[in-house]
Image: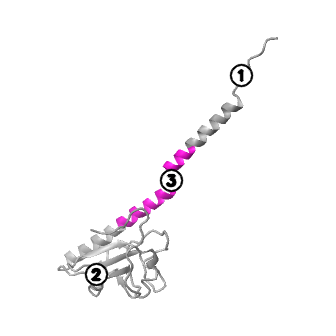
């Protein structure tokens, strides 16, 4: 009797194909790590917001005889304040997530003077990672997620509280 040659693939071949496809899926998933992409995207948004706030502050200063925003004038040089649009207490309550801690509970700086359309349409708010940030209009709100430090040379440094993929996010 002659043996008939059967057509098709063996169980070993099917197993090998499944292993190869599984391996390729793992490589693709690792290459396109969605969590890392979300973190990177949020950091890009934070960097853009820091630059936007910094640019608005510099424009205000240039348009007002080199004077800084009045609410910033009352800040202490070298101390860090949470940027808000009205909140004046509880600004250090989220220090656990801020890279550069806010120096005190009353260290809030109201930058709503920039909200006239000439400098900013609205105050940027940091994307939520650990804390749900907001404009900080009222005492029970968290604030923008951005900090401000007045430097001895009259300049101002704006920094993001949170950074997920970089060491820090701050203005030049």
Residue furthest left as drawn: 65
* Residue bearing the label numbered 3: 33
Which residue is at a point 35% across and 81% down the rendered structure image?
81
Q: Earlier in the sequence, mark 2 or mark 1?
A: 1
Q: Earlier in the sequence, mark 3 or mark 1?
A: 1
Which residue is at a point 17% across and 80% down the rendered structure image?
65
Start-end of magenta stretch: 25-48
Which residue is at a point 69% across and 27% down the rendered structure image?
9
Which residue is at a point 67% across and 36% down the rendered structure image?
15
Q: Is residue 118 visible?
A: no
* Along the line of sight, the residue nearer the viewer: 46 or 93: 93
SS of the residue under disc 3? loop
In the image, residue 34 lies in the stretch drawn in magenta: yes
* Along the line of sight, the residue nearer the viewer: 26 or 63: 26
Disc 2 and disc 1: Cα gap in Å?
80 Å
Q: Residues within 10 Å of mark 1 (few under 14, many from 20)?
A: few
């Amino acid at each position: 009797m002659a043996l008939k040659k059967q057509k098709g693939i063996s169980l070993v071949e099917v197993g090998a194909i499944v292993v190869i496809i599984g391996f390729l899926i793992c490589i693709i998933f690792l290459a396109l790590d969605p969590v890392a992409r979300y973190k990177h995207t949020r950091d890009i948004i934070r960097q853009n917001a820091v630059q936007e706030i910094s640019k608005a502050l510099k424009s205000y200063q240039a348009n007002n005889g080199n004077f800084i925003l009045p609410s910033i004038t009352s800040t202490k040089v070298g101390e860090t304040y949470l940027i808000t649009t009205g909140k004046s207490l509880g600004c250090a309550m989220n220090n656990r997530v801020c890279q550069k801690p806010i120096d005190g509970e009353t260290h809030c700086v109201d930058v709503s003077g920039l909200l006239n359309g000439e400098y900013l349409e609205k105050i940027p708010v940091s994307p939520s990672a650990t804390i749900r940030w907001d404009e900080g209009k009222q005492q029970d709100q968290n604030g923008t997620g951005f900090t401000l430090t007045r430097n001895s040379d009259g300049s101002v440094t704006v920094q993001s509280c949170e950074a997920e993929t970089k060491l820090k996010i701050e203005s030049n």
